[in-house]
Image: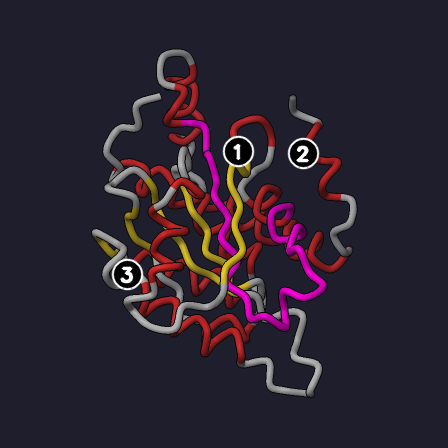
Amino acid sequence: GMEFPLLLFSPLSVKSETCFKDSMHRRMGKKPKYDHHHNHHHHHHDKSKKTLAVGVIVCASDEQRQNNDFQSIDATLLQSLGGGSHVSVVKRAICKVPSDANDDEFSNVINGPSMEGTNVIFVVVPAYPLPEDGGSSTIAFKAGLDVSHALGPILTKKANAMALQVRKSAASQDPMAALFENVVGIARGGTAVLITCSDRGLEGAAAAVTGLLGHLTSLLTSTTE
């Protein structure tokens, strides 16, 4: 079980590996001892606390979707969230960037069967591949605003302070990520935590989420397995 996810990671570039090491280092520095304790404690009788069932939704333009399945995003998230047997990407969807707050396609992806069984949903707005017409790399940041706006009616609670932590951590890996409108909140009737981020600074964003997950999952209504 444990070594399986490593197969996914080989295509990751060396650069992101070093970033990951840094963020892991930072994370371990920050992590209170109580975490280990915590996991042990829950190990036997409360597995649902520990297992992250991740849903990945990629919001991309038609052009970005043409030759790209965004699989590397899943691999990066898995690795940054600690990999191993307690994290798995159980659902993934690719959709277009929502046009407004009443975009049914977008809310259906989040609330519908495509994210069923997840307790953590990452909505990733990719900056890469960059537009071929030499367009600006800020496309993801504009799309991030659209996504943030569309999430208004979808999320039951927003955790702005946590979103700030996610942005800080992402920006420490890629300064451009500071412009992205990260959102953290509760979705799917209180059963899933939703996080939006860009693929710029993705390891940093995921590392921050890992540190916060204890708090985040405590906000969820218990998932009946």
Mark 3: which secondary structure?
helix
Characterize the local packing of mark 2: few (<14), some (14-19) or many (20 or more) Cα atoms within 10 angstroms: some
- Mark number for residue 15? none
Q: How is the image coloured?
A: secondary structure
201 or 103, which lies in front?
103
Q: Quadrant of residue 212?
A: top left
From this view, report whether residue 120 is shown above or below residue 122: above
Mark 1: which secondary structure?
strand
First in sequence: mark 3 vs mark 1:
1
Q: Disc 3 vs disc 1: which is toward the camera?
A: 1
- In percent of width and height, residue 223 lies at 30, 28
Residue indicated by mark 2: 5
Would residue 176 be found to the left or right of residue 142 on screen?
right
Instruction: Give the residue at x 37% y 27%.
Output: 49
Q: Which residues are magenta?
A: 50-75
Measure how far apart labels 3 and 1 are at the Cα level.
Answer: 24 Å
Measure how far apart labels 3 and 2 are at the Cα level.
Answer: 31 Å
Residue indicated by mark 3: 160
Residue indicated by mark 1: 87
Q: Disc 3 vs disc 2: which is toward the camera?
A: 2
- In percent of width and height, residue 110 lies at 38, 50
Q: Residue furthest top?
A: 44
Instruction: Give the residue at x 29% y 44%.
Output: 188
Q: Quadrant of residue 217?
A: top left
Would residue 115 be found to the left or right of residue 67 on screen?
left
Instruction: Give the residue at x 49% y 56%.
Output: 205
- In percent of width and height, residue 1 lies at 65, 21
Measure how far apart labels 1 and 2 are at the Cα level.
Answer: 9 Å
Q: Could you tell me the amino acid type at mark 3?
A: Asn
Characterize the local packing of mark 3: few (<14), some (14-19) or many (20 or more) Cα atoms within 10 angstroms: few
Q: Could you tell me the amino acid type at mark 1?
A: Val
Count of residue discs: 3
